[in-house]
Amino acid sequence: MSEDIPVSEEDKSSGFRAAMELMEDGDYEEACDIFESLAKSFPDDRGIWWQYLSALQHARLTQKADECTEFCYRAFADDVGFTLGWTRAFDARADWDECIRRRNAVLRQHDPRADLSYLPVVTEIFLPLVEKKEFGAIRAVLARYWDVLTRFDQCGAALYFALETIGDFERQIELCNIFLKRCDPGNPVLDGINYANLRVIAESALWNRKRLSCSGNTTQILSLGQNCLPYSIANRWGLLKYIGDPDAITIFDLGAFGRNSAAEALLSDFESFRNPENYYESQDPAGAPRMMHRPSGVHFGHERGRTLIGADHKNFFSLINKKIDAFQDMWRRSNCLLVYAIAGECDLPEFVHSMEKILEKNASRLLVLNCNRQVQECPESRNVTYFHIPFPFDYTWNEITNFTRDEGLAFDIRITAAIKNELDRMDRKQDAITWLSYV
């Protein structure tokens, strides 16, 4: 079927069936050819356009998919499905500016309170705002739509995601209390989220933050990698002093520092990571551009997308230097607790050995959390504590339906207990030093 020859009404159904069969067989580009002919012949048939868009996306014909998405959004302005597709078109590529622009454009035209089918536009704007660290805008969206978002079970995850990012533990508790009122007695789970367990986390986080804000507490918790687990869990449980400050997020907080690259970066004063010539651009599995550090193999998954990278990579280099500066500023104050999670390969003896002198010099400690199932031997060191706390099965530390189930909560508690034990140890040492200085 040639795309230049109009399709007759008699051949419409057979052509559609043929294209759908090609889709089932994975022959997406051939299906696109047929759907394109059908769409040109029957431009008002929304079903054809919908399947054509699906075929283009499966075939990864991005430019043509963008053109069709734009056309359908304009041509079928009353169709929520095409509108949502238009707002989501750049999510996978992490073009956060465009993602935000499109959602704000839709929200200026449609009030989700009047038409709840547009509510996903609100819940889905949180991701680009979080990735851009626009905390003020997140607070504004929460304030504007809180009343309607808290009415629906399926909005709970997005609400908590936003509140966790900005460290609003009071609102987290309020959220849990609202949703728990809708739960059946004895079953605190709504839409896969255990709100009784989530309230335990939020209440603990509020208490932890108050404890850390005491004037006598000088210890600073810093993530050292390998992934974002130390940052994510410490942030979730109120154990970071810089919660809610986007400018204080460090290079290790959201980085992927495999093997022993974190120690190498710290010990070299980040020299290699400040050199733009050591980076190159690649693509993540979804097709979003991301930067790779060639000498270490470290990739920056949370700094992906053209918005954060920039056309000439200058945005990325500025952001990475800012994150290095944030870490070094806190590290130079000494009395730091570095939290390191092993989630892949690591030469642990070499890692500990390489860190000993700098820990001693900086009056700091290293907490190593081995989250792999395989046991590793950790050499003894006066400044290093090691725990083997393997991941639960089928668990992801930043997925709310995982960390609020009983097994996930127990894992989080083991991690935070290890962190708090180290904090207590360091605080006692500081108290002893202070007391001796007055004797």
Image (cartoon, grey):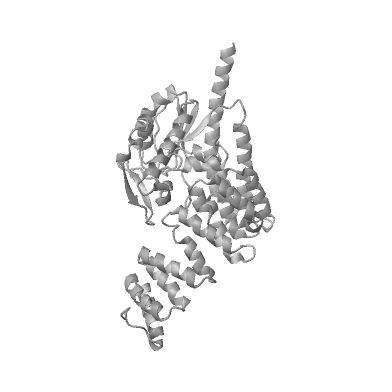
Above-or-below relation of 303 to 191: above
Point out the image quarter for the N terminus: bottom left
Q: In which quadrant of the rendered image does the C terminus lie?
A: top right
Residue located 46% across and 56% down the image: 98
- Who's the residue at 64% across and 42% down the image? 203
The structure residue drawn at horizontal position 36% and vertical position 80%, both measured from the top left corner, is 18
* Place of residue 89 in the rendered image (x, y in percent of width and height, measured from the top left): 45, 61
Residue 305 can be seen, yes or no: no
> Extreme top residue here?
439
Q: How many marks?
A: 0
Q: From where the camera sits, is residue 65 visible? A: yes
Instruction: Note whether 65 is above or below 241 in the view shown.
Output: below
Comparing 373 with 122, the one in front is 122
Residue 287, position in %: x, y?
37, 56
- Could you say where residue 362 lies in the image, as x and y percent from the top left? 45, 24
Quadrant hosting residue 269: top left
In the rendered structure, the answer to whether residue 187 lies left or right of residue 64 reads right
